Image (cartoon, grey):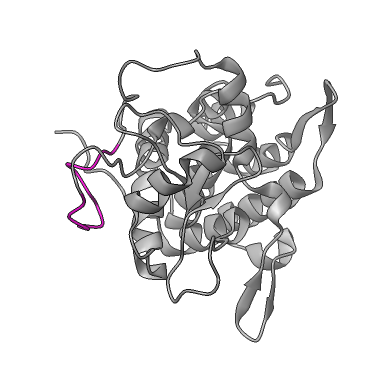
Amino acid sequence: MPAALRDMPDEGLELVKSFEGIPDGDPSTVNIDPYLDPVGIWTIGWGHAIADSAGRWLRGPAARDQALAAYPGGITRAQAETLLRADLLDACRDVQRLVTVPLTDAQFGALVSFAFNLGAGSLMKSTLLKQLNAGDAAGAAEQFLVWDKGRVDGVLKPLPGLTRRRRAERALFLGEDWRAAGGVRTVRGAVVLPLASRSIARRAEAEEQAPPARKRPARGAVLATQDPLQLRLPAGKPRRAAAKRAKKRSEPAPA
């Protein structure tokens, strides 16, 4: 019998939260409201993309009313965490499918963060996975640091935010202090976020690769009928765009 789907461990969830960030589209209200992310997609909570009933991302100022109607009154931080946990399920499933050796919670959380940020395709073709499945956990840990590059003006370069995230994931994988390794600071208990490492790059690259329109929701898209927050919204208002899970990112080829 297949193993039950493993949830994202709490420390892994905190790592993802710290690098994804949680902007508020309207700080004057009590709850967290939708906002336009840097690539023009309406988003809420920790990087949860908002889509229409066909699975297409809502984008641009013209879609503001649609985005607000999808989450009337905004959401609480607890509801934002529910959305993030739902968004992480695909990455949890991918890690369970690809890794053939036992994992501690810390190792599993680090790998889920990696797959969530870069896509399962990057994990699948990585030397990290090959070494891990061969029983070389120490060697696999060092491979996190290879995946810190993105294209800037067409040139593959290390990005400081990604470098911090990879260091944090490596530290978590090894059972070390990931906050110190990733440069995640706290001020009076609040996390100071290194926002440059957020997973928005996945959306930008998916936008370049995707066809102009989608005829149906992507695999795993969560629509209004599923409603993980149980907001009882009108039909046709989606809960997330699973297309956000870009499976390919411009990263260094595996060794």
Q: Quadrant of the C terminus?
A: top right
Closer-to-camera residue (128/30)? 30
Residue 175 appears in view: yes
Q: Is residue 132 left or right of residue 100?
A: right
The relative height of residue 50 versus residue 250 in the rendered view (above or below) is below
Which of the pair 160/110 is nearer the observer? 160
Is 214 above or below relative to 102? above
From the image, which quarter does the N terminus lie in?
top left
Q: Residue at x 31, y 26 (%)?
A: 54
Q: Position of residue 197 (x, y in %)?
A: 69, 48
The residue located at (35%, 29%) in the rendering is 55
Vertical side of 54 occupied by 212: above or below: above
For the point 64% across and 62% down, the residue is 178
Residue toward you, 42 or 101: 42
Task: Let me know if residue 167 is in the magenta part.
Answer: no
Q: Is residue 226 magenta?
A: yes
Q: Main secondary structure of the magenta part?
A: loop
Residue stretch in magenta: 222-233
Name the one closer to the observer, 113 or 207: 207
- Is 6 displayed left or right of 108 in the figure? left
Q: Position of residue 30 (x, y in %)?
A: 44, 76
Residue at horizontal 43 percent and vertical 29 percent from the top: 243
Is residue 128 visible from the viewing direction of this image?
no
